[in-house]
Each structure stands twice: as C-alpha cells, then as structure tokens.
Amino acid sequence: MPLRGLAKAKNFTLGPTAPMKTFTENINIQTKEANKLKNSGKKHSLTNDLQNENLYKYESEIKSDFDRIVPTLKEIARIQHHDDFINTAQTISKKDLGIDLPTHILDKSWVKPLDMRALYAWCVFKQHEKLSVNFFENDPLEGSSESESAIDFEKFLLDCGIHLLDITPCSDGRLAHSVAYVMRIPFSSVRRRSHAGALFDIENTVNRWVKTEHKRYRENMPNEPHKDTRYLKVVTYHFSSVDPTHQGCAAHGSNDKLAAQEGGKKLLAFKEAVENSFCCGASVDLLLIGLDTDTDSLKIHLSKSDGNIDIEKTISTLEIYDSTINLSKEDAEREICQLISKKSSEDQLYGMDKFVYKLIVNNISQIDYVKKFHKGSYKEIGHAERFIGVGIGFKEVHLRNLTYFSHLDTVEEGAPDLDVGVKIFTGLNVSQDLPIPVVIRFDYSGKVPGAKERAVKDCKRVNNAISIRYKNLVDQGLLHTCLTIRDRDKIHSAKIIGMSLDKKTEEAH
C-alpha cells in the first residue's frame, strides 16, 4: 500500500513552515510566471464575479483570524512582567483575536516564563470554534440544506440521473476547499470523506451505498427506488503545475500518473464490490478528477466505452478557459457543450455529460478567482495548514490550507494518514518551536439514543491513543488536542468538550 512508511520516508517533502513560510527552491519559475501572466487582466464571460467576491471575503476573514495569532502572542509575550499583565493581555487578545485567553496559564507568568506553546494552541482551537459557530449560524458559503443554492443543486443532480454525490479528496489541506470553491458545489449536497492519496476505504463506502439505497426504499429519499438514477462516487487526486516533482501528492511520491491510476483502481474496485454483492442491476457511476493545487484548475478523466476510466484522456478546464476566454457567454457555453458530447447547448446534455458541463463552468469561476486574488497561482504552493482535523466530521472546513484531514475511527487504522499530518506539522510548527494543534471531532446523530455519549467516549479514546503514539511531542508541549462533538441532525456548531490545555484539578490527599 502506498501509504505504508510514508511518514518516515526520507524523500517525503515537507511544505513551507508557518508562520514564517518558506518555499521549495526547485520551482519551475517559467511555469509559475506563465500561470500568472497568461490572459492576465481578462475575465472569462462565464465567471460569477459576485460569488468570487463573497468567497474571497470569507477566505480572507477566516485565515486572518488564524494568521494574527503569532503577532498577537508576540505582543503579549513582551509585556508578561508588566503590572496588570493579565487584564492587559486579555484586552489585546479580545481586540486582535476576538477571544479570551486561559487565565490559569496567564496566572503563572510571575513565577516562570509564559507558556507560549500552550497559548498558541489555545488560540488555534478557539479560532476554530469561532469558525464553526459562524459557519453553522450564518451560512457564509450559502450551502446549507435550506439554502436556495443547495435546493437547486439537488434538483440538478436528479436531472443528471444522480441521487447521491460522494466525493473523496486527498486529505492534503490544499484540497480542503475543493467542494465549495474549486467545484462550487453546496457543501450540504455532498458526502465528503478525505483520505491521504484519496485512497478511500472500499468496505466503508459500500456500507454508505447500502444506507443510501435503503433510505430510498424506505423513505423515497432523495427519490423513489425505481427511478433510473445512480450513486456517483468521485475521487479527487492532486498535482502541481509549478513544482510537479516535489509538490504533488506525497502519498504517491508526487507521481501524478500513479495518483490517477491508484484513484482509478479504488473507484473500479468499489464499483465491482457493489455489482458483485447486490443483484437487480445494482451499479454506481464513477468520476476521476485531478486538481492542480497551484491554479485550482481540473483535469477530468473521461470514461471508456466499457465504463472504465481513461487515465490518459482528460478534459483540462484550464485549456478550456484559455480557448474560450475571448468568446461571449453563449459562444463559450456552446464550445464547452460541443467538446463534451458534440451538443450545441446545455439543455441537450444528459447524465454525466450534464454534470461534467456544470463542473467545467463552475471551475472557470475558480480559475478567475485564483487569477484575480492570487495572481494566477497560489503563493503557498506547499503545505501551510493551521491545524490537523482528526476523526469524523468537519463539515465547516472548506478553505485551502486551513486543515489537514485525518478521517478515522481509530488511531490504529488511521495511523498512515495521521502520521503524514504530524510529519507535515513537524516542518510547519515544531521546527519553529510551536505545537501541533489537533482538533478531534466525532459527529453523532441526536436521534439515536446514547449517540452523544458514545461520541464523547470516541473523542477521549482517540485523544488517549494520540497521546501515547506521539508521547515525545506531547511531553514537550509540542502537541495539543481539542476534543469536539457535533449533532449532525441539527444546525449548530461543534462543541468543545475538553482540551489538553484544561486546568488540571489538584488531587486531594
């Protein structure tokens, strides 16, 4: 398996370190400049300007909340021996970060140096808490199940012959925004599970397929079981056009072809598992997509006549963008339709062709987004995540390089993913004497008796396993954890149930 031993591999490439980010020296400068300058100053006729502005506003606000942590803590560190330090520190934190600092940590500043590692982790955890509250209470991405965009997209999926959309992106933080930004799909309309290398668990995915079909038979949701629709499974691997040999997918050794091949194998194995296990024509649709983490453009792999995935033959949204940028909206739409299936309009497209058309048009807006706000190619071409997300959930995280995901039920089974994350953050944080912030999450269904209590136990179980596996980091204060749970049946934020930073209760003698 490609993941085995990855975290200890000598050729594993660390990303830029935070907060003082550095970048890979072996960058293909010509490619980078070409990405920045090609068609610069022009906007595509299919680009949604208003949506781009709103998405950038959200990205800027959230990331600035995290990026202000270090400057704020530096200011607080300078005054730790001043009179009225605690009140002054709290005032600075509230003004700059919008959060309160833990008094039990500030209290000790008069007898020993202030624990800046603990304060840093605390601030990251509280900023995540703020993000979660804002996401579920205000729906800033306008993708909740009650939103107009989600309702319209659900209807669109059914029109395409799709009753459920299940996407597995790589757990790399550079793909965390692939649903809401790159593909412009309402988050509530997608079942998203991130895995290192996009190598999803086939048995678990079959089980989710079974649950989906069972709901159709029992509740006619999202449509009746006799309707001719499919479960669409998508794998999104990634590559780098700026530095292809270093900044591709670490799980596949930055080998783009291998990443595509392994993703395709997983998809075909899932399809075979469903067809071999269930009768009556049970089947699924498959889609393999490559994401350029520098430009956010896509390579969509086409299907062969036998239903298998063509690794070599792809549709490049960046090439489509460049070839249609001088066309009117109507002409650009016609050109894309003809490219997909020789049709002249979207109304004439059906099934997967209709869905792919939507992806291409949506991604054109994202290409312009990167061109306008990031000069055509992201400055952070490598890792620059702010925290590791471990467990099941994190529906609120949809920003590039905010979170490295490690989707798991147990640390033992998820060790390859988690080890990769810790290896990345060893370069990002530990090298700067900053701790690795790990947010543990278990979503649960409030409709199921005892589910909340089991989610709490799951958090504590994973937290204990992490403290054992990475004992050396924990003992040095270089890894801190925050335990969170969330009722997936309700629209509310994640709730913090504990931290490694909590005040320790003194034992009675």
Image (cartoon, grey):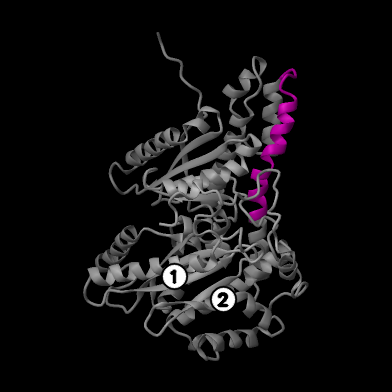
Q: Which residue is mark 1?
A: 154
Residue 214 picture quarter: bottom left
* Residue 195 vs residue 154, the one in the foreground: 195
Residue 401 showing in the rendered view: yes
Counting every numbered tag in the picture gives 2
Residue 88's disc is none
Q: Residue furthest top?
A: 509
* Residue 416 vs residue 205, the one in the foreground: 416
Residue at 66% of width from left, 50% of height from top? 61
Which numbered disc, 2 or 1, marks the residue that appears first in the sequence? 1
Q: Which residue is mark 2?
A: 360
State which region is magenta.
59-84
Which percent across, then down, holds residue 278? 23, 70
For the N terminus, which image quadrant? bottom left
Q: Residues within 10 Å of mark 2 (few under 14, many from 20)?
A: many
* Residue 413 vs residue 296, the one in the foreground: 413
Where disc 2 sits, the SS reads: helix
Q: Which amino acid lies under the numbered mark 1 shown in the image of this protein?
A: Glu
The answer to if 72 sits in the magenta stretch is: yes
Which percent across, then down, holds residue 88? 71, 26
The answer to if 444 sits in the magenta stretch is: no
Q: Which amino acid lies under the numbered mark 2 shown in the image of this protein?
A: Ile
